[in-house]
Image (spheres, rainbow, N blue to C red):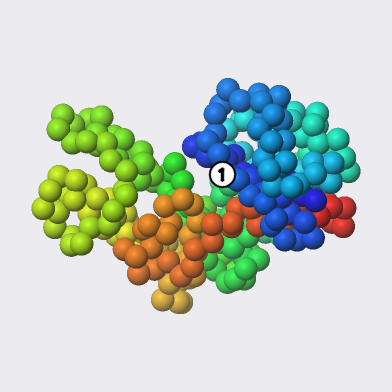
């Protein structure tokens, strides 16, 4: 089995693959003070509840945007996954990806952005845009070579709501737990909800429009796939998201592992 881990700034998503099928997945908060021993305690408990024997895990791959947690995860894998057939793998632009990372500084591109691009290209094999609704909202572009050619980064929905509450005297910190029945908010709460949902929906449509002009100048717009916790919430307020895949990053990790360790695991 393959253990794949995506470490984000806010959450860590992990999954177990057996014969190419996702047989268990978890979404937990990313705590930067988490040690390898603490990871072992937590995940061995999750494995036990899911009926997964960690001795059957023979491959490990991690994509992390938090360097200190990447170190903890690699230490965890080396120390507690005793049946690995090769050293644990961390995603960088230097691995075999099935595409070139064609940016000015490939080393600065977040591992999660690379992984999402790989998974989306494998699925569609056309020029495309991946939108990841995480702590930040990222738009990542793949051309028809294929090559990852960059994208844009925006403050996430949670960050924006936090900033609104912390920088204003009378506006509360809200979670988007209801959808507005009309764009014009008739209460403060409804106005914030409407501003977030219609506003970020408009951001998505505008960015897909302008990125498509550069990415696919001879087409109306590029294929667009979204992932991340807020993707489903925002999609009804956009016209340009073709599909949502909450397992996109885990799928990309599995694909990259297979490219670099073909025939050895899962």
Instruction: Report the residue at 80% width, 28% height from top.
Output: 79
Quarter of the picture holding the C terminus: bottom right
Indicate the quadrant where residue 19 lies: bottom right
Numbered-mark total: 1
Q: Secondary structure at mark 1?
A: strand
- Viewer-nearest residue: 187 or 111: 187
Residue highlighted by disc 1: 27
Residue 148 in sight in this render: no
Q: Quadrant of residue 65?
A: top right
Residue 14 visible? The answer is: yes
219, above or below 134, in the image: below
Residue 159 locus on image (x, y percent): 36, 38
What x and y, as percent, mark residue 163?
29, 34
Residue 192: x and y, percent? 21, 47
Where residue 70 appears, as percent x and y from the top left, is 65, 33
Residue at 76%, 43% in the rendered image: 60
Q: Which quadrant would residue 123 be assigned to in this image? A: bottom right
């Amino acid at each position: 089995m393959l253990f794949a881990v995506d470490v984000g700034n806010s959450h860590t998503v992990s999954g177990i693959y057996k014969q190419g099928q996702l047989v268990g997945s978890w979404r937990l908060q990313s705590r930067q003070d988490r040690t390898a021993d603490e990871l072992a305690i937590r995940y061995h408990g999750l494995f036990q509840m899911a009926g997964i024997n960690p001795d059957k895990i023979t491959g490990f791959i991690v994509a992390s945007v938090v360097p200190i947690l990447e170190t903890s995860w690699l230490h965890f894998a080396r120390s507690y996954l005793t049946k690995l057939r090769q050293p644990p793998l961390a995603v960088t632009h230097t691995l075999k990806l099935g595409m070139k990372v064609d940016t000015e500084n490939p080393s600065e591109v977040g591992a999660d952005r690379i992984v999402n691009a790989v998974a989306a290209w494998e699925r569609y094999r056309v020029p495309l845009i991946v939108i990841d609704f995480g702590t930040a909202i990222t738009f990542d572009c793949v051309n028809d070579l294929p090559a990852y050619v960059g994208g844009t980064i925006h403050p996430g929905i949670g960050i924006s709501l936090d900033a609104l509450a912390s920088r204003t005297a009378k506006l509360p910190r809200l979670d988007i737990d209801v959808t507005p029945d009309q764009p014009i908010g008739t209460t403060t709460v409804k106005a914030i909800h409407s501003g977030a949902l219609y506003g970020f929906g408009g951001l998505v449509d505008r960015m897909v429009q302008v990125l498509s002009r550069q990415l696919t100048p001879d087409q109306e717009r590029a294929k667009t796939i979204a992932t991340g916790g807020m993707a489903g919430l925002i999609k009804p307020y956009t016209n340009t998201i073709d599909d949502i895949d909450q397992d996109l990053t885990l799928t990309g990790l599995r694909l990259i592992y297979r490219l670099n360790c073909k025939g050895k695991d899962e």
